[in-house]
């Protein structure tokens, strides 16, 4: 069993298939698992959502893919924030990685 921390990691995506798997793995490789990972898609057409679904099946963390496709960058961010239930919010963008650290 992993330790969890009251953090919602918000991961807004748009056509990030080249990077999204590594971004999710960098979240899951932390010394503590976030309370949840919220993925908000802005209408990707490159298979990003399929990659996220594959990672969700393997994840030992709560990974939520929002069902509604948002339009535009800010709307995508806001959608992820509204869905978050953690005490704290950490944004991670599709082409970023988290360095290994304690939360």
Image: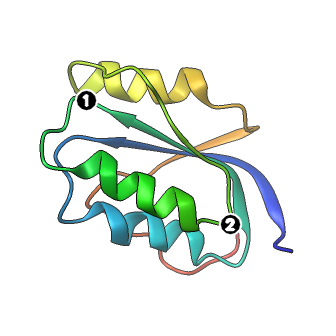
Position of residue 42 measured from the top left corner of the image (x, y, whole percent):
25, 29
Q: Is residue 45 left or right of residue 20?
A: left
Front-most of residues 82 and 46: 46
Q: Residue 42 carries which label?
A: 1
Q: Is residue 85 left or right of residue 47?
A: right
Q: Earlier in the sequence, mark 1 or mark 2?
A: 1
Position of residue 80 measured from the top left corner of the image (x, y, whole percent):
48, 30
User: Which of the image's four quarters has the C terminus?
Assistant: bottom right
Position of residue 37 measured from the top left corner of the image (x, y, whole percent):
57, 48
Residue plotted at (81% across, 73% down): 2
Alpha-carbon span between mark 1 and mark 2: 25 Å
Residue plotted at (31% across, 22% down): 69
Mark 2, Cα crowd under 10 Å, few <14 / some 14-19 / many 20+, is few
Give the structural element (helix, strand or loop) at label 1.
loop
Considering only vertical position in the picture, is 99 above or below 19?
A: below
User: Which of the 4 image quarters holds residue 18?
Assistant: bottom left
Tell us which disc is closer to us: 1 or 2: 2
Residue plotted at (31% across, 60% down): 20
Q: In the rendered image, which residue does mark 2 sit on?
A: 60
Front-most of residues 57 and 3: 57
């Amino acid at each position: 069993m992993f330790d969890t921390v009251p953090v919602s990691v918000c991961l807004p995506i748009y056509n990030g298939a080249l990077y999204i798997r590594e971004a999710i793995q960098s979240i899951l490789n932390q010394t503590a698992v976030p309370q949840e990972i919220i993925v908000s898609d802005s209408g990707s057409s490159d298979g990003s959502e399929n990659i996220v679904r594959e990672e969700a099946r393997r994840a030992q963390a709560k990974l939520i893919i929002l069902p509604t496709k948002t339009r535009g960058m800010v709307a995508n961010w806001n959608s992820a924030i509204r869905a978050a239930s953690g005490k704290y919010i950490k944004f991670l963008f599709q082409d970023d990685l988290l360095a290994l650290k304690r939360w």
